[in-house]
Image: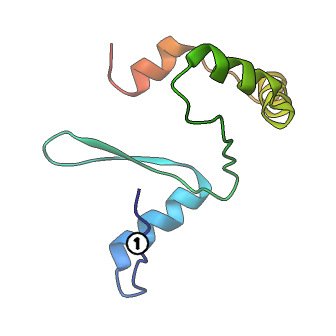
Amino acid sequence: MKTMTVSARAKTLNNLLKRARRTGLILQSADGQRFLLASLDDWEGFDVGAGDDFAREVELTVRNKKLMKFLAERRTHGKRVPLAKIKEQLGLN
């Protein structure tokens, strides 16, 4: 993925970025292709390795205490939305 700097003169794009700061946006092109625009301020990534042995990768991932804590917190906090509702919102029914 490539990082691009948006010029202060790109008013339309800056307005979209401003809206995306509050809540993520799904942008849809005229041909129907969809793109996600969301702030990465609260994003947290985890290195789970790059090996070819899937069983080993699972073992290492489970041992990643920081990741397991993060997943446990996500499981217990926040509003849950049923998958059917998400599909409906995205027009996937």
Q: Which residue lies furthest to the bottom in this view?
A: 9
Determine which quarter of the picture holds residue 75: top right
Instruction: Read off the residue under disc 1.
Output: 4
Amino acid found under the numbered disc labelled 1: Met
Residue 66 at what x, y percent from top left? 84, 37
The residue positioned 42% from the left and 19% from the top of the image is 87
From the top left corner, tell me how far across and down residue 88 is, in percent.
41, 19
- The front one of 68 and 33 is 68
Where is residue 67? Give x, y as percent: 78, 33
Q: Quadrant of the N terminus?
A: bottom left
The chosen color scheme is rainbow
Asked if residue 39 is positioned above or below residue 28 in the image, the reply reads below
SS at badge 1: loop
- Above-or-below relation of 88 to 77: above
The answer to which of 65 and 33 lies nearer the viewer is 65
Q: In which quarter of the image is residue 39?
A: bottom right
Decide if residue 18 is on the left or right side of residue 22. Answer: left
Q: How many labels does the image show?
A: 1
| Residue pictured at 64% horizontal, 23% vertical | 57
Mark 1 burial class by Cα count in 10 Å: few <14, some 14-19, many 20+:
few
Q: In this view, does 28 lie to the left or right of 58?
A: left
Is 61 placed above or below 50 here? above
- Which one is in front, 23 or 64? 64
- Residue at coordinates 37% horizontally, 70% vertically from top-left? 13
> For the point 48% across and 65% down, which residue is it?
17
